[in-house]
Image (spheres, grey):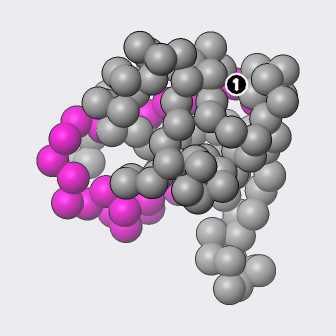
Amino acid sequence: MALLHIAEQSDWEAAQQTGVYDRSTRGASIAQVGYLHGSATMDQVRSVLGFVYADVTEPLVLLTLDEGELAAHGLRVLLEPGDPQDPDSELFPHVYGGPVPVSAVRSVEPLSRD
């Protein structure tokens, strides 16, 4: 399964300095939310871009995470409903267990809103 995450470029740059990426989603840390929000497909990425990041002017990047590397650091990925109130809603991958080591990020690509 692809494990994709939208990041603000400045947050990714900060993670490279500290060695860990601690953001869950726009404006919230993993500690605050309890997990990192992810997407399994580019369709999900586009949906999240429109819903969560539509008014962000800062550059965004798309992180591709390595599930095996996450597991090696004690993190686990669960597929969960995008709408917690609707268990039949589309499933999204969530990463539990704490901040993500930058070593678990396999690629970083600029992300266009187009």
Q: Is residue 46 left or right of residue 101?
A: left
Q: Is residue 46 visible?
A: no
Q: Quadrant of the N terminus?
A: top right
Q: Would you identify the image quadrant in which residue 109 lies? A: top left
Residue in front for this viewpoint, 114 or 66: 66
Count of marks overlaid on the render:
1
Q: Residue at x 62, y 34 (%)?
A: 99
Task: Name which residue type carries label 1.
Answer: Asp
Residue in front for this viewpoint, 16 or 37: 16
Residue 91 locus on image (x, y percent): 71, 63
Residue 41 locus on image (x, y percent): 59, 47
Find numbered disc 1 in the image and state the secondary structure of the residue it sits on: loop
- Which contiguous range is marked in magenta? 41-67
Seen in the picture, residue 8 relative to 12 is either above or below; the reply is: below
Residue 82 locus on image (x, y percent): 63, 69
Seen in the picture, residue 61 relative to 92 is either above or below; the reply is: above
Furthest-bottom residue in this view: 85
Q: Residue at x 37, y 62 (%)?
A: 52
Q: Is residue 71 left or right of residue 43?
A: right
Seen in the picture, residue 59 relative to 13 is either above or below; the reply is: below
Residue in front for this viewpoint, 29 or 5: 29
Mark 1: give few (<14), some (14-19) or many (20+) Cα within 10 Å: some
Which residue bears the numbered disc 1? 66
Q: Is residue 91 visible?
A: yes
